[in-house]
Image (cartoon, helix red, strand yellow):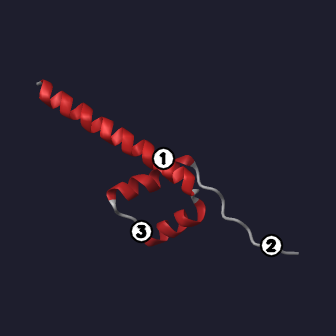
Amino acid sequence: MSDPVQKPPKASLWRTARAVAWSFVGLRKNSEYQKDLAQLNPFHIIAVGIAAAVIFVLGLVALVNWVVAK
């Protein structure tokens, strides 16, 4: 007997972080996008995206403070 429809394996946190990083850059292969679409949880993408945006903004603030202090 064959199995009914199998769900694709869930992606790891690392794969979610990579997908978010590529989306920040704006470059993505269509095949990789399709894999991500099938495997990634939208709530995880939102959480990682918000965390990445906060880290990016804090990094910019730290860079500006460092440059202005010199």
Between discs 1 and 2, the one toward the N terminus:
2
Q: Nearer the viewer, mark 1 or mark 3?
A: 1
* Residue lying furthest top: 69
Q: SS class of the residue under badge 3?
A: loop
**Which of 26/44 is in front?**
44
Residue drawn where x is 45% and y is 52% of the image: 18
Give the Cα separation between the discs numbered 1 and 3: 20 Å
Residue type of the residue flagged with mark 3: Lys
Image quadrant where residue 3 sits:
bottom right
Quarter placement of the C terminus: top left
Residue under circle 1? 48
Residue type of the residue flagged with mark 1: Val
How crowded is the residue under tag 2: few (<14 C-alpha within 10 Å), some, or many (20+)? few
Image quadrant where residue 60 sits:
top left
Residue under circle 2? 4
**Which of 28/67 is in front?**
67
Residue drawn where x is 37% and y is 39% of the image: 55
Residue drawn where x is 37% and y is 45% of the image: 53
Between discs 1 and 3, the one toward the N terminus:
3
Q: SS class of the residue under badge 1?
A: helix
Residue drawn where x is 30% and y is 36% of the image: 59
Residue under circle 3? 29
Q: In this view, does 16 lie above or below 26?
A: above
Give the Cα separation between the discs numbered 3 and 2: 30 Å
Is 4 situated left or right of 23 in this image?
right
Instruction: Give the tally of numbered discs.
Output: 3
Residues under numbered marks 1 and 3 in contact, where contact means CB atoms less than 8 Å apart = no
Residue 27 drawn at (x, y percent): 35, 63
Give the Cα separation between the discs numbered 1 and 2: 32 Å
Residue 6 drawn at (x, y percent): 73, 68
Residue type of the residue flagged with mark 2: Pro
